[in-house]
Amino acid sequence: MSTLIDGKALAEELRGEVGLEAAALLQRHGRAPGLAAVLVGEDAASQVYVRNKHKACQQAGLHSEVFRLPSDCPRERLLALVDLLNADPAFDGILVQLPLPAHLNEQEVLERIRPDKDVDGFHPINVGRVLAGLPGAFAPATPAGIVELLRRSGIPTAGAHVVVLGRSNIVGKPLASLLMQKGPGADATVTVCHSRSRELADHCRRADILVAAIGRARFVSADMVKEGAVVVDVGINRIEDPTAPKGSRLVGDVDFDAVAPRCRAITPVPGGVGPMTIAMLLKNTVESARRRLEGPR
């Protein structure tokens, strides 16, 4: 029988720690850590994500503001807003919710954010510092959340063979970089696979820890997972389900019901990686504020 890794409970624990740090900074310096979220357009999923982040900030005692722009917002207006937020001492972190409307260049906008306020960890300077294992970099929240989830669950990574299924800049690549570094929560042997990998199932079956982030609903089947492996499901896919209240439900990239009996431990969807992502975003924001107010450790 596999152990269910409760990401919601672990995230609550982490958010409690972040809240204590935020309160201490407020007491010492007279202001709470601040996060600015920029939302362009009316994408329904993006609005939900930003609303959840804003609510989590408030619950943890962080100052949070959402800046909304219309979907036809000119490039210059968006960049000007980012410049204003870069210069505003009330904000220690800036996130621009992706995806952006097609007429806007996402990379240009991400590179406009100051690296020391890039709590999403997407600026090339932070990407490079994470890859090099240098201190002070902000790692993207989802990969950092996965590392923290494994650590808090008592799942050792040192010497483990981790297979990351997916090579995105948001999850796959930075997660591989984090896991292969030296130190706690890392020291793993990492294989990165993707949709063009040959003998994909064979690679997955070799994993002590399998991370599924390929973006395909229930893609990972039982025959792709070795007995006793740990499975981390990053996927969020909505599928039709006439029995569900709204006629659809969320599932991951793993066929949970079939895979769970083979695993030592597995994350659910929802309630697994997702809550850790938001918690790590708050942690990065508080760390950014601490550095700004108190300098490097």
Image (cartoon, rainbow, N blue to C red):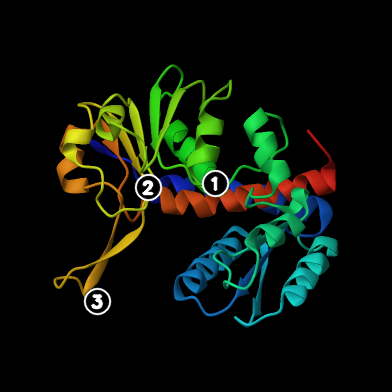
Amino acid type, callout 1: Asn
Q: What residue is shown at x 85% (from left), y 63% (from top)?
A: 87
Q: Is residue 38 left or right of residue 227?
A: right
Q: Quadrant of residue 201?
A: top left
Q: Is the Cβ of the residue at disc 3 closer than 8 Å to that at disc 1?
A: no
Amino acid type, callout 3: Lys
Q: Is residue 88 left or right of residue 59?
A: right
From the image, state whether disc 3 or disc 1 is nearer to you: 1
Q: In the image, residue 156 lies at what x, y percent?
A: 42, 23
Q: CA distance from mark 3 to mark 1?
A: 32 Å
- Quick one: 171 or 152, which is closer to the camera? 171
Q: Earlier in the sequence, mark 2 or mark 1?
A: 1
**Which residue is labeled 1 in the image?**
169
Which label is found at residue 246? 3
The reply to whether residue 158 is in sight is yes
Amino acid type, callout 2: Ile
Which label is found at residue 214? 2
- Kindly state the secondary structure of the residue where label 2 is placed: loop
Circle 2 Cα neighbour tier, 10 Å, few/some/many (<14 / 14–19 / ≥20): many
From this view, report whether residue 34 is shown above or below residue 67: above
From the image, state whether disc 2 or disc 3 is nearer to you: 2
- Kindly state the secondary structure of the residue where label 1 is placed: loop
